[in-house]
């Protein structure tokens, strides 16, 4: 399992996401954007009101912003880790901050450091928590 920085380092520019993913992402012609990790995680480039913007779609949810790093956190926390979590993946304590930022961004809520500090207070500084447990705690406290 990749940390957020490792995940982000796999970013590869792709001029034709449709072909790379063997999918039709819609639009007039091929969609461009970035591929991550194993090549199944992606963020699209779009032009919104004449300025570069990025689109992330996960199932029936979507986010449109010019903040690529925020979308990468959402993609990492809400999609990549959830897939890894099905196989018992563990988050180290130093990954929790980025995980919380990604999940909060996905749900469009401000990060409340005091709340999340209390929710994860039992995770030692050098400890781990399962992705599934972290997800359950986050969702029950949103």
Image (cartoon, rainbow, N blue to C red):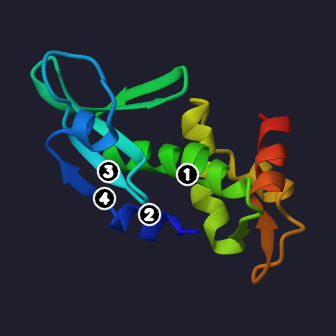
**1 or 2: tag closer to the N-terminus:** 2
Q: Distance between the residues labelled 3 and 2?
A: 10 Å
Q: Which residue lies under the disc numbered 3?
A: 35
Quadrant location of residue 24?
top left
In the rendered structure, are the residues bearing label 1 and label 4 in contact, judged by CB atoms less than 8 Å apart? no
State the residue at coordinates (53%, 69%).
Answer: 2
Relative height, residue 1 to residue 108 (above, below): below
Q: Distance between the residues labelled 3 and 1?
A: 12 Å
Q: Which residue lies under the disc numbered 2?
A: 7
Neighbour class for label 2 at 10 Å: few (<14), some, many (≥20)? some
Residue 17 at x, y percent in the picture: 25, 38
State the residue at coordinates (32%, 45%).
Answer: 68
Q: In this view, does 104 lie to the left or right of 76?
A: right
> Is residue 59 among what the camera can see?
yes
Question: In this orientation, which residue lies closer to the viewer: 123 or 43?
Answer: 43
Q: Distance between the residues labelled 3 and 4?
A: 6 Å
Q: Which residue lies under the disc numbered 4?
A: 11
| Name of the residue lying farthest toward the left | 50
In the rendered structure, are the residues bearing label 3 and label 4 in contact, judged by CB atoms less than 8 Å apart? yes
| Name of the residue lying farthest toward the bottom | 126
> Is residue 67 among what the camera can see?
no
């Amino acid at each position: 399992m990749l940390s957020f920085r490792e995940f982000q380092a796999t970013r590869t520019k792709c001029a034709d996401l449709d072909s790379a993913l063997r999918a039709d992402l819609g639009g007039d012609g091929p969609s461009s954007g970035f591929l991550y990790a194993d090549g199944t995680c992606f963020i699209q480039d779009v032009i919104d009101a004449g300025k570069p913007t990025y689109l992330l779609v996960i199932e029936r949810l979507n986010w449109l912003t010019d903040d690529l790093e925020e979308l990468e956190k959402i993609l990492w926390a809400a999609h990549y880790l959830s897939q890894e979590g099905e196989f018992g993946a563990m988050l180290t304590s130093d990954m929790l901050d980025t995980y919380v930022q990604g999940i909060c961004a996905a749900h469009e809520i401000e990060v409340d450091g005091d709340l999340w500090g209390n929710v994860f207070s039992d995770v030692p500084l050098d400890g781990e928590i399962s992705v599934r447990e972290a997800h359950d705690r986050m969702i029950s406290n949103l």
